[in-house]
C-alpha cells in the first residue's frame, strides 16, 4: 500500500499526468541526443598517434573539417596537409583511406576520442596493423606544455646512422625552428624523409611523420659536445641509433648509389603489361623516335608520390613537344590485379596521365632481374633519360622531394635541362663519348627517405 499510495495521489491531481509524460519524453530525447552526439565524429583539431612495436607512439596532426559535401579528414605533418579519401561514417565508427596508398584507417568514435587501427601494407602482401588513437582539442605534438627556453636546433646537420643489422648510413638533416616548434626533413643517399614535424623541449628534440606511406620517429638529446644523439624508429626497419653534428656544409655523397648501365652503347629496352594487361614495349609506335623519361617507381613509396607530381607537371609542359614518360611500377604484390588497383589509386592521387606499366615486385633483386641492362636497382625512384635513338643519356638515382626546399628546386631544374637536351637531340643520334660515360653517371641530387 505504501508504494502504491503516492502513485494514486499523483494521478488524482489535475494536469500532473500530462506534465509527467512530457518530462519523460524530454529526458528520453536528451539522453538520445547525448548518446548520438557521443558517437558522431566531432570537427576540430585532434592529436593522433599510431603505435609502432615496442609501444613507441608516433604523433601526427588530424584535422576534421566540414565542407559542402560533409565532414572531411586531413592529416597534418608540418607544412603538409593531406586530404584523406572515401570517408565512410556510421554512428560510432569511421573508415578512411590515404590517397594513393592502400593504407586504411578504421576507428571507433566515442565523444572526443577516436580509437582503432591503421592497416599499412608491406612487401610480399604483408599488412601490419598499428594501434591508433586521437583526442580532440590537443594541438601539441609531443609535449603538452612548452618551455620558455629551448636549445636551438635550426640549421644543417651531418647525421650518421648505425643499426644492429644494417650498414652505417650517412645523411643530412635540414631543420627550421620557431620557438619550440621544429620542422624539416632528413636527406639520405636514396631519398628524403619528407615532412617531419615536432618540438624542442630544453635540450631534447622529437620529430615525427605519418602520411600513409611511412611512419617515422626521431628522439634525440644534445650531449656535452653539442651533438644530437638519439634513435630513429620506422615501420620498415629495426631501430637505428644516430649522431648528428651541426655542419653548414653537410652534403650527400651519392656515388655509391649511382645506377649504371652494363652497356651504354646499347638501346634500352623494356616490355611489361599496362593496367589493362596489354603488353607495352619500348618498340611501341608511340615511343618511336621520341625522347623518353623512364622512371622506376612504386605506389607504396612516398618519394615516388613526390616524383609523380613533378612528372605530371613535366608531362603537361613537354608532351606536345614530343616527350614521352613511362613509369615502371614495382609493387608490393605478386598478384597482377591487386598491383594494378594499387597503381590506379596512385595515378588518381598524383594526377599523372602518362603510361604506367606493372613491372614486378618491389624486391630490388627481382627488379634488377627484370631490367638486366642495369647493373642493379638500388633505389626507388630512379629515372633514365633516353634519347630519340633509345640510348640512355643520364640516370638519376633517388629523389629530393619538396620537403628539401632548394634541393628540390635544383632537382626539378636539372630534370628540365635534361629534357631540353633530349628534345634537341636529332632522331638518329649516333653513339657518342657522352653516351659511353653514362655507366658512371651519378645522381644529380639525391635525398633521404623511406623508399
Image (cartoon, rainbow, N blue to C red):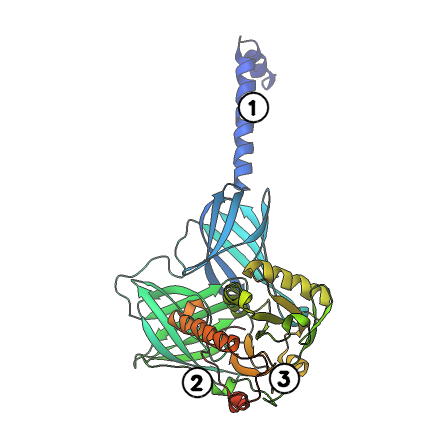
Q: Quadrant of residue 356?
A: bottom right
Measured in 3D between alpha carbons, the distance from the residue under mark 3 to the one under mark 1, in whole angstroms, is: 81 Å
Residue 162 at x, y = what percent? 47, 83
Q: Quadrant of residue 348?
A: bottom right
- Nearer mark to the viewer, of 3 and 1: 3
Q: Is residue 402 left or right of residue 341?
A: left
Q: Is residue 301 above or below residue 26?
A: below
Name the foreground residue: 229 vs 423.
423
Residue 273 at x, y = what percent? 71, 70
Residue 266 in sight here: yes
Measured in 3D between alpha carbons, the distance from the residue under mark 2 to the one under mark 3, in whole angstroms, is: 29 Å
Residue 332 in sight here: no
Kindly identify the residue that appears in the image at 42 percent across and 82 percent down: 252
Q: Secondary structure at mark 1?
A: helix
Instruction: Report which residue position mark 1 lands on.
Output: 25
Q: Is residue 102 above or below residue 252?
A: above
Instruction: Report which residue position mark 2 lands on.
Output: 253
Residue 292 at x, y = what percent? 58, 74
Instruction: Report which residue position mark 3 lands on.
Output: 267
Mark 1, other Cα within 10 Å: few <14 / some 14–19 / many ≥20 = few
- Nearer mark to the viewer, of 2 and 3: 3
Kindly identify the residue that appears in the image at 53 percent across and 13 percent down: 16
Residue 205 at x, y = what percent? 37, 69
Q: Is residue 389 left or right of residue 252?
A: right
Name the foreground residue: 322 vs 329.
322
Q: Earlier in the sequence, mark 1 or mark 2?
A: 1
* Picture quarter with the C terminus: bottom right
Q: Is residue 401 above or below residue 374?
A: above
Name the foreground residue: 425 vs 143.
425
In the picture as drawn, the residue positioned furthest to the left comes out as 149
Amino acid at each position: 500500500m505504501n508504494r502504491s499510495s503516492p502513485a494514486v495521489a499523483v494521478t488524482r491531481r489535475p494536469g500532473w499526468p500530462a506534465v509527467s509524460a512530457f518530462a519523460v519524453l524530454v529526458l528520453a530525447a536528451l539522453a538520445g541526443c547525448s548518446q548520438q552526439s557521443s558517437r558522431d565524429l566531432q570537427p576540430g583539431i585532434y592529436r593522433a598517434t599510431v603505435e609502432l612495436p615496442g609501444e613507441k607512439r608516433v604523433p601526427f596532426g588530424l584535422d576534421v573539417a566540414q565542407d559542402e559535401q560533409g565532414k572531411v579528414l586531413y592529416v597534418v605533418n608540418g607544412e603538409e596537409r593531406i586530404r584523406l579519401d572515401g570517408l565512410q561514417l556510421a554512428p560510432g565508427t569511421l573508415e578512411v583511406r590515404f590517397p594513393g596508398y592502400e593504407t586504411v584507417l578504421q576507428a571507433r568514435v566515442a565523444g572526443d576520442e577516436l580509437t582503432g587501427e591503421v592497416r599499412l601494407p608491406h612487401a610480399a602482401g604483408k599488412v601490419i596493423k598499428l594501434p591508433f588513437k586521437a583526442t580532440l582539442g590537443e594541438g601539441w605534438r609531443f609535449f603538452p606544455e612548452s618551455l620558455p627556453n629551448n636549445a636551438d636546433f635550426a640549421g644543417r646537420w651531418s647525421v650518421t646512422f648505425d643499426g644492429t643489422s644494417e650498414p652505417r648510413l650517412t645523411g643530412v638533416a635540414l631543420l627550421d625552428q620557431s620557438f619550440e616548434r621544429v620542422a624539416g626533413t632528413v636527406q639520405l643517399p636514396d631519398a628524403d624523409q619528407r615532412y617531419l614535424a615536432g618540438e624542442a623541449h630544453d635540450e631534447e628534440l622529437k620529430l615525427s611523420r605519418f602520411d600513409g606511406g611511412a611512419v617515422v620517429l626521431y628522439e634525440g638529446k644534445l650531449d656535452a659536445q653539442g651533438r644530437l644523439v638519439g634513435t630513429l624508429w620506422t615501420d620498415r626497419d629495426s631501430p637505428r641509433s644516430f649522431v648528428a653534428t651541426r655542419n653548414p656544409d653537410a652534403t650527400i655523397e651519392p656515388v655509391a648509389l649511382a645506377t649504371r648501365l652494363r652497356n651504354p652503347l646499347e638501346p634500352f629496352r623494356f616490355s611489361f603489361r599496362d593496367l589493362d594487361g596489354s603488353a607495352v614495349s619500348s618498340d611501341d609506335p608511340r615511343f618511336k623516335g621520341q625522347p623518353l623519361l623512364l622512371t622506376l617507381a612504386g605506389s607504396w613509396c612516398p618519394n615516388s608520390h613526390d616524383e609523380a607530381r613533378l612528372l605530371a607537371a613535366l608531362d603537361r609542359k613537354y608532351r606536345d613537344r614530343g616527350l614521352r614518360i613511362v613509369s615502371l611500377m614495382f609493387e608490393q604484390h605478386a598478384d597482377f590485379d591487386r598491383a594494378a588497383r594499387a597503381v590506379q589509386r596512385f595515378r588518381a592521387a598524383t594526377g599523372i596521365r602518362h603510361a604506367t606499366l606493372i613491372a614486378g615486385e618491389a624486391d630490388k633483386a627481382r627488379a634488377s632481374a627484370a631490367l638486366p641492362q642495369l647493373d642493379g636497382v638500388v633505389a626507388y625512384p630512379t629515372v633514365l633519360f633516353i634519347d630519340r635513338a633509345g640510348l640512355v643519356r643520364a640516370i638519376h638515382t633517388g629523389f629530393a622531394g619538396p620537403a628539401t626546399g632548394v634541393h628540390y628546386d635544383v632537382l626539378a631544374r636539372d630534370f628540365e635541362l635534361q629534357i631540353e637536351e633530349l628534345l634537341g637531340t636529332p632522331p638518329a643520334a649516333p653513339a657518342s663519348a657522352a653516351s659511353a660515360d653514362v655507366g658512371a653517371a651519378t645522381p644529380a641530387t639525391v635525398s633521404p627517405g623511406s623508399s
